[in-house]
Image (cartoon, helix red, strand yellow):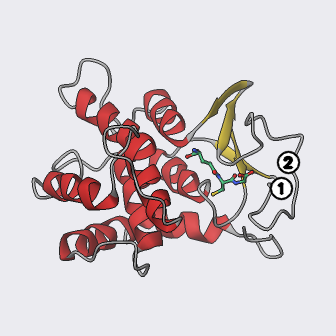
């Protein structure tokens, strides 16, 4: 049984979406986290080394950081084919786009959000203006990052683009708009939204 350490309306919300897609057995454990304004505190029940969300525990096996959790879960629950397994020709692309999410795309968006210039050739990531064309080129090949096949990588990218959709830091693109629509119209997304914020839970 998977335990998802979760705070509503945060990066852990997308893992309710993924767990619903996988039809995996899971429970949600709400935890507190620190907020940007300095309020809130790390929850001692949360196994993430910095008290962040998401983190999961699989009968005591702890996994943290979004791409690692996505990979762990799609390997652990392969039934619905949300992640190419070892030996599948798409495995390399899957691992690459998962790692790119956390190693390049998020830092690119955060750099722009914080108005920090990306020192090309020094930082391990690139500016949004360089990252997004690579993603767009990939999405030009098919409806999803792996072509015709929806995967957990789309859960990460689709929910991120949905979140930044109205923000000026997100370059406007009909390809991304259509992509986001495809992702958020999935029944598992609607189920996840309904479970994300139980009445009375704090948003963060
Ligand atoms: N690199 C982490 C980022 C996790 C993260 O920063 N989560 C935020 C919520 S969206 C958090 O827990 N913030 C509380 C804190 O920074 O202590 C991942 O992708 O899993």
Kindly indicate whether the residue at mark 2 contacts the one at mark 1 (C-beta within 8 angstroms).
yes
Instruction: Give the residue number, with chain letter if any, for mark 2.
Output: 42
- Look at 75% across and 70% down and name the residue there: 198
The answer to whether residue 51 is above or below residue 30 is above
Q: Position of residue 79 (x, y in %)?
A: 39, 35
- Look at 68% across and 48% down and name the residue there: 53
Quarter of the image for residue 55 reads top right
- Look at 29% across and 72% down and name the residue there: 171
Left or right for 192, reference 83: right
Q: Position of residue 106 (x, y in %)?
A: 45, 52
Left or right for 78, reference 145: right
- Look at 23% across and 54% down and name the residue there: 135
* Residue 82 seen anywhere in this rendered image of the structure: no
User: Label 2: few (<14), some or many (≥20) within 10 Å?
Assistant: some
Q: Position of residue 26 (x, y in %)?
A: 65, 44
Quarter of the image for residue 74 reads top left
User: Label 1: few (<14), some or many (≥20) within 10 Å?
Assistant: many
- Which part of the image, by quadrant, shows the C terminus? bottom right
Viewer-side residue, 3 vs 162: 162
Quarter of the image for residue 41 reads bottom right
Instruction: Give the residue number, with chain letter if any, for mark 1.
Output: 32
Tell me: is circle 2 under 8 Å from ligand 1.
yes
- Circle on res. 108: none
């Amino acid at each position: 049984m998977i335990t998802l350490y979760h705070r509503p309306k945060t990066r852990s919300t997308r893992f309710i979406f993924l767990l619903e897609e996988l039809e995996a057995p899971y429970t949600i454990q709400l935890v507190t986290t620190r907020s940007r304004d300095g309020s809130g505190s790390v929850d001692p029940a949360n196994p993430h080394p910095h008290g962040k969300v998401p983190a999961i525990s699989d009968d005591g096996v702890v996994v943290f950081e979004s791409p690692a959790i996505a990979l762990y879960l799609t390997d652990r629950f392969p039934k619905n084919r949300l992640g190419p397994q070892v030996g599948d020709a798409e495995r390399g692309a899957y691992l690459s786009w998962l790692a790119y999410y956390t190693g390049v795309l998020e830092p690119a968006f955060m750099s722009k959000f914080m108005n920090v210039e990306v020192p090309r050739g020094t930082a391990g990531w690139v500016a949004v203006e360089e990252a997004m064309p690579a993603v767009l080129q990939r999405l030009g090949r098919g409806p999803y990052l792996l072509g015709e096949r929806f995967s957990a990588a789309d859960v990460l990218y689709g929910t991120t683009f949905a979140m930044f959709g109205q923000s000026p830091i997100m370059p406007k693109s009909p390809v991304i708009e259509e992509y986001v629509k495809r992702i958020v119209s999935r029944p598992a997304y609607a189920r996840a939204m309904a479970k994300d914020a139980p009445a009375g839970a704090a948003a963060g």
